[in-house]
Amino acid sequence: MTTRERSEALAARAREVMVGGVNSPVRAFKAVGGEPLFFERADGPRMWDADGNEYLEYVGSWGPMILGHGHPAVVEAVADAARQGFSFGACAEGEVLLAEKVRELVPSMERVRMVNSGTEATMSALRAARGFTGRDKIVKFAGNYHGHGDGLLVKAGSGAMTFGVPDSAGVPADVARSTLTATYNDLGSVRELIAAAEGDVAAIIVEPVAGNMGVVPPADGFLEGLRGLCDADGIVLILDEVMSGFRVALGGAQARYDVRPDLSCFGKVVGGGFPVGCYGGRAEIMDCISPAGPVYQAGTLSGNPVAMAAGLATLRQLDEALYEGLEARSDQLEQGLRAAAGDAGVTATTNRVGSMVTLFFQEGPVTDYESATRSDTERFGAWWRGMRDRGVFLPPSQFEALFVSASHTTDDIGATLDAAREVLGTLG
Ligand code: PMP
């Protein structure tokens, strides 16, 4: 019998001292029963909780751990950097090396600025776009999540969608009014908003592969269509690649779908598990940022040397062969899940782009926010708990992507599918 006594005791203490017992809402597991797990250790594709239970895991710290946990090259780079000094408050070579590596892998990143999270990257990219264009409004898509910046918590996905509060309290109405919300994969809805805004749209921001309403791939021509609409009206196209960057291809979604944005945002993989984000793109837009230009943006710990070392060591491990392996094992997982659901008589559909996968408990197709919300979230909760009880740790929400890492083997996927068949069998 699995016990989770220590996790439960820690959760009780956490609730007394930490808001809601967590430092980020999705960790409260409210959508799947509300019993947070506390973890102690991770290695490769596995993690161990505070009670010593072992899990094959597909959260991957919500995306960063593309190599799996504790890759020796990354551990060594972090230890070396830490010995040299934690933080200088001044420039260091690691910042240049990581920026050069990002630009080598993603050529649209002509100028790069390091920040500390995906949220900072998107907030700053929007400010840059507004400063460059002198316009106020932005267009985002329902069910896309771009971090917790004020203007971006309008019809947001991820935790906001999981908890049924797509609009946050505490966001000034004036700020929310500058955010226009379109329908994902629907260019017509974007055209209408641009026309109604009468020349005041500074930027369109989009997850080029949506991961925050579960995985939703861009429809054929969608990203290209956005590029065209932006070109026609002098609008800055921002691809939020915080999740898709270095994940769906070495060059991110922009390489996979061959679309060149004006600005891009990265996070997660670019920090190799440390708090790093970055944004960048066309030099003439980025040169609006301080100290080169009038748009202010700064950070005490931005470009932190230990974090830069982790990111660089991670990106240096990535090559085409790694993505081929990820594709093959992710396909094995997706096909296996779909077949297992079919055999068990459970209504379900899958979406997958590269190593991002979602099993939706509904008939599908899932193409946007509206269709994603048709999923049976009660059933998802039972699925999640059943997998947890069999030692498989999945993202605790229907509206998230699971991530396969380079450390998951064919046998790991096989073991996961064995557990999935058992659990789906109990749900049919
Ligand atoms: N953009 C996207 C697409 C994301 O998935 C996330 C986080 N899941 C963010 C932005 C925000 O990043 P962070 O949590 O590092 O602030």
Image (cartoon, helix red, strand yellow):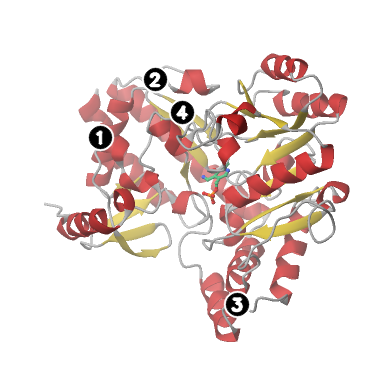
Mark 1 or mark 3: which comes first in sequence? 3
Which mark, residue 350?
Answer: 4
Mark 4 or mark 1: which comes first in sequence? 4
Callout 2 amino acid = Gln
**Real-space CA distance between mark 1 and mark 3, rounded to the nearest whole angstrom:** 47 Å
| Residue at image location 81% in from the left, 51% down from the top | 286
Mark 3, mark 2: which one is toward the viewer?
A: 3
Camera-side residue of 419 and 249: 249
**Real-space CA distance between mark 2 and mark 4, rounded to the nearest whole angstrom:** 9 Å
Mark 2 or mark 4: which comes first in sequence? 4
Task: Note whether 183 is above or below 131 in the view shown.
Answer: above
Write down the residue under mark 1: 423
Residue 113 sits in quarter = bottom right
Callout 3 amino acid = Ser
**Real-space CA distance between mark 3 and mark 2, rounded to the nearest whole angstrom:** 49 Å
Camera-side residue of 92 and 251: 92
Task: Note whether 301 is above or below 249 in the view shown.
Answer: below
Query: Would residue 102 be seen by someone viewing this image from the given angle?
Result: yes
Report helix, strand or loop for mark 2. Answer: loop
Mark 3 or mark 2: which comes first in sequence? 3
Callout 1 amino acid = Val
Callout 4 amino acid = Thr
Report the quarter where the C terminus lies: top left
Write down the residue under mark 3: 87
Report helix, strand or loop for mark 1. Answer: helix
